[in-house]
């Protein structure tokens, strides 16, 4: 005889109890992403490729940003950014869009915000060959830093899961979240050294940007892929601690709100 | 005897907010009511309900519309969280709730079957093994790859019922959904439910049809305004329920005359 579990609560055991469900929802998300389109899977490469070309023309050629091999530079930060922004925007509406299950049948609600994060990660990994080709093409030094890649991947996953849990829960009661989020994502993108190098920011203002943990994450990607450097271990550790804190915060926010999902949707 | 469901002093209160007159930010700022607390009214949908269902028993819940039956079921399924009280369940629960079946409209019947199976805790291998049975039972062989939004209400119910009985739950909760199918399919469902009973599984039926209750249940509960009015054998509960209904209708008749 066990106490009835509250299905709407986010617990870490969700990965064990509903692993298959999560797996199949992620697979469905990936399959559905380009379903019915003529080029299908190739959009995984075409999307970043088209963005890369645009940024290269504007920043590499028109504005002459100080970053040699600009296509490789932009792509090393843009690919994880695309994962970040898409997961955030999709994740924030995940519970509202799950209205056909939430509160109507037996369904573990907390899997919903995790799906876009994990699907985005797979999509990111699949798009990596594009970057590797560019690295080889521009003969950039590939160093030991690449060994830090899994760490960055884990940090970003934790960070995103925390954020999507919090945002998806908030947007149920506070529907303005989605509208605000669109702007926040755009502002973040411009404020972070993804399409321009960190050195392009005036010395006096640099500290503001440097204290943004997200900058640390995306700069980490640039370090290992583009600069061929090894990220500072202390920085990685601090980023990891930050990501765990965000994950925990997201979980708490989610669980505070989750009791009322069934009543609000 | 082991218990399948045990409910102790269960209550669920909904807060109902008075609709605010000023809906937009601008209006609320102008009227200075931005942070004013809205009056809320407590609606007690389920009030101090206690009962237990033994394993292998068929248990009925009867009551009029709005008595709190659906809320009670949602609490039993873990969809809603109790305001107070305790629920313990022994085994896997599958439910057929009348409000929506939890299908994803854009997905094919096939994908929905898989998704529902996974939600109920089956592994993909187990679903694959039962898949043909599910489709055959629902008589949807020709439509299983069509998206669910193209299905009729009857087709949805057939698929939902078929999934619920074929995933082999320990406890099956049915909320008056059997009225939807045609006679032939209803017969089939009833036969499957009988089989379910004989296999020693627990069945929880919610209905406002007394005949169904007395025919199926070993014990029953009458829920009225969220509270338990009677609990016992179906005939006793039915008697109490009918007396009340008769009283209410004769009172209404007197009012109408006067």
Image (cartoon, rainbow, N blue to C red):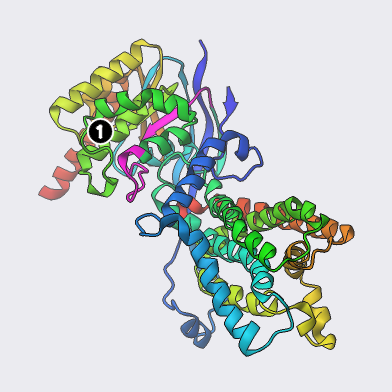
Which residue is denoted by mark 1 in the rendering? B158
Q: Where, by quadrant of the figure, is residue B202 drawn?
A: top left
Q: Is residue B101 magenta?
A: yes
Q: Which residues are magenta?
A: B89-110
Residue at 52% across, 61% down: A45
Give above or below for B201 relative to A39: above
Residue at 34% across, 47% down: B107
What x and y, as percent, mark residue B40?
Answer: 49, 62
Between A178 and B230, the one lying in front of the other is A178
What x and y, as percent, mark residue A80?
Answer: 64, 63
Between B132 and B151, the one lying in front of the other is B132
What x and y, as percent, mark residue B75?
Answer: 47, 38
Magenta: main secondary structure equals: loop
Residue at 76% across, 52% down: A151
Give above or below for A126 relative to A202: above
Helix, strand or loop at mark 1 = helix
Between B217 and A196, the one lying in front of the other is A196
What x and y, as percent, mark residue A36?
Answer: 34, 56
Give above or below for A227 relative to B156: below
Task: Tell how many labels.
Answer: 1
B22 displayed left or right of A54? left
Between B146 and A140, the one lying in front of the other is A140
Q: Where, by quadrant of the figure, is residue B242 drawn?
A: top left
Q: Where, by quadrant of the figure, is residue B126 drawn?
A: top left
Residue at 67% across, 69% down: A72
Q: Is residue B29 visible?
A: yes
Chain ID, mark 1: B
């Amino acid at each position: 005889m066990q106490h009835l579990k509250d299905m709407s609560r986010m617990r870490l055991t969700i990965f064990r109890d509903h692993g298959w469900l999560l797996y199949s929802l992620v697979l469905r998300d990936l399959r559905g992403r380009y379903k019915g389109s003529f080029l299908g899977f190739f959009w995984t490469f075409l999307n970043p490729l088209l963005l890369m070309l645009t940024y290269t023309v504007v920043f590499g050629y028109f504005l002459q940003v100080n970053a040699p091999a600009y296509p490789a530079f932009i792509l090393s930060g843009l690919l994880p950014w695309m994962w970040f922004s898409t997961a955030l925007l999709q994740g924030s509406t995940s519970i509202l869009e799950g209205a056909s299950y939430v509160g109507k049948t037996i369904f573990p609600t907390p899997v919903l915000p995790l799906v876009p994060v994990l699907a985005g990660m797979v999509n990111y990994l699949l798009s990596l060959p594009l970057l590797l080709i560019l690295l080889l093409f521009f003969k950039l030094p590939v160093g030991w830093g690449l060994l830090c890649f899994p760490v960055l991947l884990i940090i970003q996953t934790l960070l995103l899961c925390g954020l999507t849990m919090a945002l998806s829960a908030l947007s149920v009661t506070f529907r303005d979240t989605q509208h605000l989020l669109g702007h926040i994502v755009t502002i973040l993108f411009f404020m972070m050294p993804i399409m321009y190098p960190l050195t392009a920011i005036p010395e006096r203002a640099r500290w503001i940007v440097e204290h943004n943990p997200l900058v640390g994450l995306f700069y980490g990607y640039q370090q290992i892929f583009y600069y061929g450097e090894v990220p500072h271990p202390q920085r990685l550790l601090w980023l990891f601690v930050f990501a765990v804190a965000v994950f925990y915060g997201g979980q708490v926010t989610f669980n505070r709100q989750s009791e009322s999902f069934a009543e609000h949707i | 005897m082991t218990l399948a469901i045990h409910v102790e002093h269960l209550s669920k209160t909904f807060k109902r907010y008075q609709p605010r007159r000023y809906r937009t930010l601008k209006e609320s700022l102008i009227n200075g009511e931005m942070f004013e607390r809205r009056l809320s009214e407590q609606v007690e949908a389920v009030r101090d309900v206690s009962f237990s269902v033994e394993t292998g028993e068929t248990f009925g819940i009867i009551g009029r519309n709005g008595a709190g039956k659906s809320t009670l079921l949602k609490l039993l399924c873990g969809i809603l969280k109790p305001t107070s009280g305790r629920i313990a369940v022994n085994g896997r629960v599958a439910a057929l709730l009348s409000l929506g079946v939890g299908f994803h409209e854009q997905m094919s019947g096939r994908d929905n079957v898989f998704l529902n199976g996974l939600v109920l805790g089956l592994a993909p291998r187990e679903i694959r093994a039962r898949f043909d049975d599910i489709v055959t039972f629902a008589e949807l062989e020709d439509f299983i790859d069509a998206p669910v939004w193209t299905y009729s209400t009857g087709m949805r119910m057939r698929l939902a019922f078929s999934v619920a009985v074929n995933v082999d739950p320990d406890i099956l909760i049915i909320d008056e959904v059997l009225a939807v199918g045609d006679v032939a399919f209803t017969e089939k469902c009833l036969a499957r439910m009988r089989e379910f009973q004989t296999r020693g599984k627990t069945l929880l039926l919610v209905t406002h049809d007394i005949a169904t209750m007395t025919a199926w249940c070993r014990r029953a509960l009458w829920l009225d305004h969220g509270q338990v009015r009677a609990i016992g054998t179906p005939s006793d509960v039915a008697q109490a329920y009918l007396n009340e209904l008769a009283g209410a209708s004769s009172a209404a008749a007197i009012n109408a005359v006067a």
